[in-house]
Image (cartoon, grey):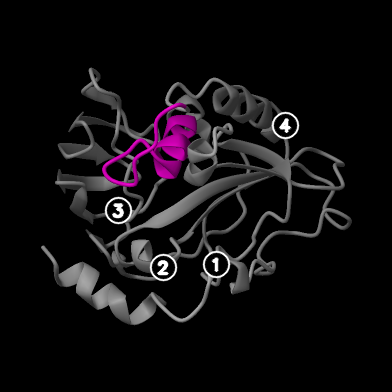
Amino acid sequence: MIAGPLLALGEVKIMGKAWWEASRQSSGVSPNPDEVMEAVIQVFAARAFSWRGILGVHTWIAVKPTNASEYTVYQLVGWRLRRGEDPVVIQRDIPDRLWYDAVPELLVDVRGEGVDELIKKIDKAAKNYPYRNTYSVWPGPNSNTFIAWIGRIVPELRLDLPPTAIGKDWLGRIKFFSSTPSGTGYQFSVLGLFGILIGVEEGLEINILGLNFGIDVFDMSLRLPGIGRLGFQRTIRPRTL
């Protein structure tokens, strides 16, 4: 069970830099809004800062409506709640920033006709997120619970969150059954600690104490805690609805 996190240690920077010294520059993945007029939705995941990155990632959604000159980023930031602020952050920002030195992985890239309507659905879902007054790094609710919530409400995204997105399986204190974040299957989960998930996008995944193990037949990959996906390299290309 601990093999994945131990292997991930080699890729995660734990010590040696304060958060304000870490890079937040663009990774160069998102299209320039001055050059691409069509609507764009992108979802990213990047290793969490410091020791948290051994096990998990932070996820966020960036959107650009048709002809917009800027992106809006949707994410949940836990430390804001500790300061008495709203942890749900919706703001104009660089969409593909490094997450404090960690290069983001592109999970979804949807563009073109019909995407403006999805952006409206994302905005409404984010503003209606029901767990904004509670935050827990493990097993949730946290930043990944927030993005998974949006994914379930906007299944057109077909959002396959990696097994390292701890918190994605937190369904609530009294809710145990739901669709998967991709909207292509179903899952059973007890407080994000134990459960099973099966979906076209995710494959089969078993959750034990918040650590996810699984297999994705279509992608020919394993899904492992700490490591994430292990198998053929996935290339996310822009798609239309």
On screen, residue 109 versus residue 150, left or right, reads right
Mark toward the viewer: 3 or 2: 2
SS at circle 3: loop
The one nearer the camera, 179 or 147, is 147
Q: Which mark is residue 116?
A: 4
Q: Position of residue 15 (x, y in %)?
A: 41, 78
Q: Which mark is residue 50?
A: 2
Mark 1 / mark 3, whichever is N-terminal: 1
Mark toward the viewer: 4 or 2: 2
| Extent of the magenta region | 133-151
Mark 4 / mark 2, whichever is N-terminal: 2
User: Which three-letter amino acid code belongs to the residue tagged 3?
Assistant: Pro
What residue is pinned by disc 1? Answer: 19
Q: Position of residue 39 (x, y in %)?
A: 75, 41
What residue is pinned by disc 3? Answer: 163
SS at circle 2: helix
Q: Which mark is residue 156?
A: none
